[in-house]
Image: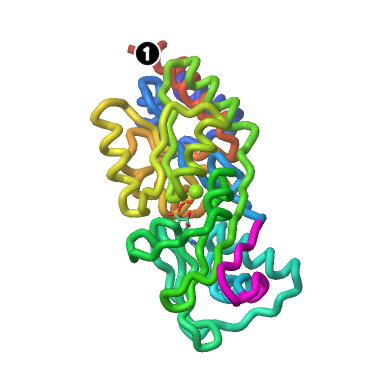
Amino acid sequence: AVPLVVAVSTALAAQSGLLIRNRQAFEGARNLQAIVFDKTGTLTRGVFGVTDILAFGDVSEEEILRRAASLEENSEHPIARGIVQSAGERDISLSQPQEFRAISGKGVEGRVDGILTRVVSPGYLKEEDITVVDSRVEKTLSQGKTVVFVLQDRTVLGALALADIVREESRDAISHLKEMGVRCMMLTGDNQFVAKWVAEEIGLDDYFAEVLPHEKAEKIKEVQKQYRVAMVGDGINDAPALVQADVGIAIGAGTDVAVESADIVLVRSDPRDVVDIIVLSKKTYSKMV
Ligand code: ADP
Ligand code: MG
């Protein structure tokens, strides 16, 4: 049988927009010492808009966007959605790519009009030893934007800068958690500059940037050497980290995979509800011995 106090608290949790999928994890939440948040779609809205198109050579800005969007129509990533949307707003008609492949945590590649095309992260270029020298890239990065490069074979045609919006609620959530003595961190596959910008913007204690999807659970393990940790995320990428964490918390509006991997779901998709998890867990389980 479920003890009365727990049953009552589960009802309270439901009122707070929490779906408890694992009662034991909920009990453990009262002892959390650190929370690791995913960036895109968790601390930020996860809705990107293209703010700048940078052309490095003879291929026009519009053509760079057209090729990128043609590939990205096959991707579900928030960056891909932003790029396709931006091409749509400019009435650019897209080509159906002949080949398509996602490069996990790094970008996409395929053939657009027979040309080998890639849309990739700064980290991918570094790995491939491709250097870009253009002061406009540094400038957009310093503005805390997400930057992806558009390639034709090994030639970098240009770059697209994208901006996402930090959720107002994130700032609030972080300041409450810090008051409670909980260390707040962020994990992202995005570049160092965006990560730093977001971290400063909302007052995080620490962050890890350019983390590949398969490394996310490893990072949680590392943090666990020091702290009892919860992970909050929304993406398919986040699922192994949610499972690894002492408490896995999924954003309700996130992917099914994230929700199914989580111990607790934030039904309202509001990061402030993480505070309630700890408060309710303390209230419920401190009454029991
Ligand atoms: P996160 O989930 O933390 O946002 P991801 O692991 O999904 O990060 O992606 C990391 C980086 O890989 C992105 O910031 C981007 O540079 C690149 N990337 C991933 N998917 C795409 C895509 N569809 N198009 C372009 N770049 C992508
Ligand atoms: Mg995410």
Position of residue 259 relative to residue 130, above or below, is above
- The percent coordinates of residue 67 (x first, y second) are 58, 76
State yes or no: residue 55 in magenta: yes
The residue drawn where x is 46% and y is 42% is: 38
Residues in magenta? 52-63
Is residue 228 positioned above or below 86 on the image? Answer: above
Q: Residue at x 43, y 16 (%)?
A: 181
Name the foreground residue: 189 vs 115.
115
User: Up-down: is 208 above or below 155?
Assistant: above
Please indicate whether residue 8 sits to the left or right of residue 285 in the image: right
Name the residue carrying label 1. 288
Seen from the viewer's position, the closer of residues 168 and 33 is 168
269 w.r.t. 59: above or below: above
Q: Which residue is outermost to the left?
A: 225
In-front residue for pair 171/137: 137
Q: Position of residue 118 (x, y in %)?
A: 47, 72
Res. 249 visible in picture = no
Where residue 147 appears, as percent x and y from the top left, is 53, 56
At label 1, the amino acid type is: Met
Queried whether the magenta region covers residue 189, the answer comes back as: no
Q: Quadrant of the C terminus?
A: top left
- Under circle 1, the secondary element is loop
Label 1 beta carbon within 8 A of ligand 2: no
